[in-house]
Image: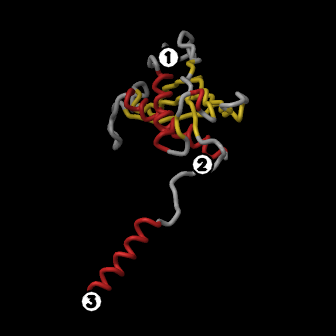
Amino acid sequence: MNKLKHFFFISCILYFVCFCGCGYTTRAYVGAHKSIYVAPFKNSINIATERAAYSRYMSYYPLLESTITQKVVSRFIFDGSLRVLKEEDADTILRGELISYSRDALIYADNNEDVEEYRITLTVNIIFYDGESGKKIWQKDSLSGDTSYFETGPSSQVIKSEKSALDDAIDDLARRIVEAFVEQW
């Protein structure tokens, strides 16, 4: 009988631990909005212009704005603070515009001509609208995501391609966009 009481007591404790929880959540957003629609980002980069006198060409990847849109949607889903819905069903609407993509030299080799490390920076403007009224809730200009990468050279860093570094910069930008929304409230 003593073993039965002991088993019952442990079962009750496990039940309370497993099913009652402590009330903590990973969600940081506590605002009134419950859903969001992420409109396709607009690309406002003019790739025909030179960005600096020393630049022969501007590095650019096609459909960059589509990739940013997809990553932002994925980040909102991962965050879980807002449900991502169709435009007509959402409480808020995010509209963004890609305004800059830059690849700048950070570290040169000993000959001062060859670049060993680059920094990629993506810059966007974002505006959040109320889904019902269409009025602007707030906006943030010149929000950037960036990363650096080594192409060559004796570095302790892992050498990676520009495309791989660009993916990292897009991930960083998407994280910053979601954080900007969550921290606004």
Label 3 crowd (10 A; few <14 / some 14-19 / many >=20): few
**Which mark identifies residue 29?**
2
Q: Amino acid at mark 2?
A: Tyr
Judge depth for marks 2 and 1 and give the one in front.
2
Q: Amino acid at mark 3?
A: Met
Return the x and y of residue 59 as percentages of the image width and height. Answer: 46, 19
Label 1 crowd (10 A; few <14 / some 14-19 / many >=20): some
Q: Secondary structure at mark 2?
A: loop
Q: CB of mark 2 within 8 Å of CB of mark 3?
A: no
In the depicted view, which residue is nearer to us: 148 or 137?
Answer: 137
**Which mark identifies residue 122?**
none
When the figure is inspected, residue 16 is found, relative to residue 161, above or below; the finding is below
Query: Residue at 52% of width from left, 30% of height from top?
Result: 121
Query: Residue at 62% of width from left, 50% of height from top?
Result: 30
Image-based side of 129 in relation to 157, left or right: right
When the figure is inspected, residue 79 is found, relative to residue 50, above or below; the finding is below
How far apart are labels 2 and 3 at the CA level? Answer: 50 Å
Quarter occupied by residue 161: top left
Query: Residue at 37% of width from left, 31% of height from top?
Result: 164
Query: Residue at 48% of width from left, 26% of height from top?
Result: 103
N-terminal label among 1 and 3: 3
Quarter occupied by residue 86: top right
Q: Amino acid at mark 1?
A: Met
- Residue that numbered label 1 is attached to: 58
How far apart are labels 1 and 3 at the CA level? Answer: 81 Å
User: Do we see residue 78 in this rendering?
Assistant: yes
In the depicted view, which residue is nearer to us: 64 or 66?
Answer: 66
- Residue that numbered label 3 is attached to: 1
Return the x and y of residue 147 as percentages of the image width and height. Answer: 47, 36
When the figure is inspected, residue 55 is found, relative to residue 158, above or below; the finding is above
Return the x and y of residue 153 as percentages of the image width and height. Answer: 33, 34
Judge depth for marks 1 and 3 and give the one in front.
3
